Structure formats: C-alpha cells, structure tokens
Amino acid sequence: MIVKSVLIKQFRDIKNQSFYVGKNLTAIVGKNKSMKSTVLGVVSQTFSLTDINNPLYGKKTIDGYNLISQFSEKFKFDSKYENDRAGKHEWTLTLEDDIDNVNNPFSVISIIRDKKKPNDPPRFWKAGTKGKGSGYLQIPVYFLSLSRLYPIGESNLTYQTVATDVLSDPELKQDFDKAYASILSDPHFGKTETSIHQSKSGKLSFLGVTTDKYSYLANSAGESNIAKIIIAALSFKKIKRDTISGYVGAILCIDELDATLHPSAQIKLIDFLNKISKENNIQILFTTHSQNIIERLKQFILRNNTTNNMNHIVLFTQRTGEIVTIDTIKNIADFRKMEANLLTKPYIPKKIDVYLEDPVASKLLTKILGTKISTRLNKCPSSLGFAEYIELHTKKIPCFLNSIIVLDGDVATKGTSTQKAHIKKHKDSFILLPGKEALEIELYNTIAEMTPEEASSCLSQKQEVIMADFTSCPTGHSEKKDFCKRFYRETDVKIINELLSLWINKNKTKVHEFKNAFITMFDTLAVKTNTEPIETNSGQN
C-alpha cells in the first residue's frame, strides 16, 4: 500500500474533501459533472519516475509507456476562469509509513509554468519547493485515460500498418492469455498461437489481440480495452519481478473502467484486478458508472468488513451551489443511499416485515420502539393467535422465515411445551412482548391497582369516571380477557395512551430488555436480507 488517503483542499468545485484509498481497489463513482476523472488525474499526477537516481528510472510498461505523469492526458485549463489559474489548486496525500525519503503527508500546489506566459496552464509541484526533481513522488504510475482506451475501429489503421508484437515474455504471455480468456469467457483463447499487437495512429497507440482466425484490427472496443488494461497491470508485475531493489508498489489509474464491456466481463475484470493488485502491491483506482462493478465491490467490502481497507468505493456528489462532496461507502445503508443518489431517487431505507397478533400489540410495539425505529417496520397485525403463527412457521411458509413474529406475553403461560420449545429454538424469528398477560389485561390491571390519588396525578380523567362501567372484572381467563378488550375498545384513546406510558414506565427494565433484543433481531435479519440495520441510522436506538 502506498496511499492511505487523499485530501483535496481546493480544485475547481471541490473544497476540503477527503477520502481513503483502498489497499487494492478504489472505485470512484458519481453522476456526470462530479469531477471523478479530475480527481483520478490528481492522484496519478502526484507520481512520476523522473529522478535519474531512482533504481526504477527508465522502466517502461510492456506497451512502452514511460511511467512519467503526463499533464495533458488529465487536465484542460482555461486561464480566463479564476479556478483554473495558478495558486488555485492544492491537494495532500497521506502515505503508508514505510514509504521512505518523502515528506508525509505529501502536498502539491499549482504554480506558474512560465512567468512570461501567465495565461499558460499552471504546473503542479510539491508544496514549498521548486527544485528540479522535487515535484513528484518517485513511484511508477500508469494513467489509462479514455484517449488511451480509444477503440481500434475509430482509428485510420489498415492491414498495411506496421504492428509490433509487444509481449514475448513466456510467463507474462501465459498470464495474459489466462486473464483474457477468463474475462471474455472464451475457453478456447490461448489454445492456439496468439499475439498482442500494437500500432500507432498519430499520437494514439492501439493494442489488440491477433489469433489464427482474426487480426487485432478486427478487435471490438471491448476486446481492445481489456487487452490494454491487462497489459497495464502485468507491466507492474514485470517491473516487480525484474527489479532487484526499489520497488515498493505502483499506482494504476483507469478512467471509465467499464467502458464498452459486457456486464460479465466487468465482474471478471474486477476479480482479475483485485488478485493482481494483492500479488504485486498495485493500488488501482478507477472511475465507473457500472452497477455490476459496484455490486461486486460491495460483496468484497461487506464480506471483509474487518479489513475493509482492502477495497473502497467513494461517491462524488455535486450538491447545491455546484460544490462536490466525497463520501466513503462502508455499509449496507451507505450502498443503498449511493444507489438512490446514482438513480436520482429519494433514499428510503428498506423495511422488514413484523407480524403481530392484533392492532393492540402493534400500538404497544410502536410505543416501546419509538417512531424512528417503527418506520423501518412493515407491521402486519392480524387476527391470528400465537398457535397459528407457530404452526405456519413450522410449515416453513416463506413470508414468515425472513420476518419477525411478535407474540403477546401470555404465550409463556398459555402455550404448550411444544410451542414454547419451537419459539426457544427459533429465537431469530420469535420475540415475546413484555408482560405476562395480553396487553388489554395489563392496562386494565394498571388502572385498577392504582389509588385514586395516583390516578389523579397521572391521568387526565378521574379514575372513577374511566372505570364507571368496568368495576367488576370476571375471574375466569376467557371472560376476563373479553372484559378487558371491551375496556380497551371503549376507553378514550388519550387515556389508553396515558396507561401505555404508565405501564411502560412501571416495567422499565423488561421494556428495555425487549427493545434491545428486538433491535438485535432486526439487525441480524438485516444482514441476511441485505437490509440496512437499525444501528446504522443515527438516533434510532
């Protein structure tokens, strides 16, 4: 790993924005006009092999690129705009601790290229110095811009054009054939003689594959781009292999990685780049609009969240006032917010289905959890009792397997041993509301057990008025439950809410334990169903 993080202090529409760089892959995503390609250029422009005393000086890529940053490949400036003038650009890279002989962090600013030509584009240089050879980090870098990924079919090359076979190394040729065949899902590629040819047309160079059946000139844009990207990555493997000392890693930047590529090729290309990056200490940064690439990296990041410095996704967003903000995508909630951003739609967190025995239980659940958490639930109160829910779950009815089933507290005393054993075995699906009885009975008992003085201090009506028609509660369970349900239905909603608050306060410990257990259940199920956990939403706990 070379670069830990990047801080853009100022560069056109970006002010004081930073992001971390993955040890292997870093995807820069965002809508058009969000300066993704510019920042990719900023990172690569910091590096260049220009110091003749560096042991890697003079090294080239397989296709002849000299590993020196080319300003013109990345930036176009117009001095009539203030933000394009010298002194209006500054960025800082924080480097890995074992990068020797450089200032860390390493800052770059824009300076006047020629005092006699103030309207010329600025040049970028290490902050605080102007000495020859001090302007760049001496680490190999390759910037594959859209111009370098220019398709062969758009050129004026012909079969009479001189073409050079650029890859004669047997080991690297075998690596190329394997990667090319895998990415393009061509199991026959490499079984017969193949070669990688390069031709030039003006300032552009074109790379493609020639086989016994077709010439590189017949390559599609996708085939040509795949060949260029593989060659770029293998170039650093070659430098590492052939260098006795001085190789600490490399930077490979690719603009529009997914351009012209089929979805399956995009995914396999990510797998190839991830592997070769690990093996050769290549930090690969690229821009992309591909949902397939984002989804593949999402799998890497979420699967390895204990080592998520390996791969990163950063989202560039142009907000009000034309200012660009940069966010690192770390978890499921971040990914769903990013998806909403890229599709220009509002972000609405996914919900999880919660089944309850009746609307009364639903009301209690909302009261315990609070509004913010409750908005994450698709509550489904029904007339089913606990026995029916347990039976349906036993039969593995799909809708009950990826949901939470909330049962009244009386199941602990009214359920059979078999039913209670099933609930205990499936703690990831079932949870019991606090209390030993149905909620209606709990609320009736709450007011019935209060003294008139307690009631007058807590309730907005007198106790005797509230209970005027409900003074004689039956003792039989079924009769008592029906009586208390009638009390619940016929009592003013305001009084019911006051009794709910009193009951929750009276059972504070059990309610707190229930809430924590419910959130844990939700978050566990969220991971299983690719849903945002409650804990990622600020203030919901």
Image (cartoon, rainbow, N blue to C red):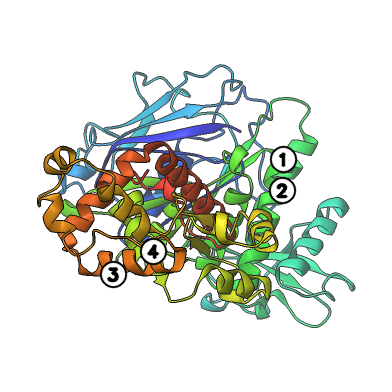
Closest to the camera, between mark 4 and mark 1, is: 4
Q: Residues under labels 2 and 3: Cα distance?
A: 71 Å
On the rendered structure, is 342 left or right of 200?
left
Q: Position of residue 62 (x, y in %)?
A: 70, 51
The residue lying toward the viewer, choosing from 8 and 325, is: 325
The residue beneath circle 1 is: 280
Q: CA distance from mark 4 to mark 1?
A: 75 Å
Q: Nearer the viewer, mark 4 or mark 3?
A: 4
Query: Which one is earlier in the sequence, the residue at label 1 or at label 3?
Result: 1
Q: Earlier in the sequence, mark 2 or mark 3?
A: 2
SS at badge 4: helix
Q: Amino acid at mark 1?
A: Asn
In the rendered image, which quarter contains the N terminus?
top right
The x, y position of residue 113, in whole percent, is 30, 34
Q: Position of residue 336 (x, y in %)?
A: 43, 60
Q: Please, what secondary structure does the residue beneath circle 1 have?
A: helix
Of the image marks 4 and 1, the number of the one nearer the N terminus: 1
User: Which residue bears the numbered disc 3?
Assistant: 486
Tag 2 residue: 276
Q: Which residue is mark 4?
A: 480
Q: Nearer the viewer, mark 1 or mark 3?
A: 3
Label 2 element class? helix
Distance from Cα at disc 4 to Cα at disc 3: 10 Å
Image check: 375 left or right of 394? left
Eyeballing the image, is 424 above or below 149?
A: above
Q: Nearer the viewer, residue 281 or 142?
A: 281
Along the line of sight, which residue is nearer the eye, 305 or 496?
Answer: 496
Kind of residue at badge 3:
Arg
The percent position of residue 97, horizontal first and vertical second, equals 57, 21
Cβ–Cβ under 8 Å for marks 2 and 1: yes
Disc 2 marks a residue whose amino acid type is Ile
How crowded pointer 3 is (Cα within 10 Å; few <14, some 14-19, many 20+) is rated as few
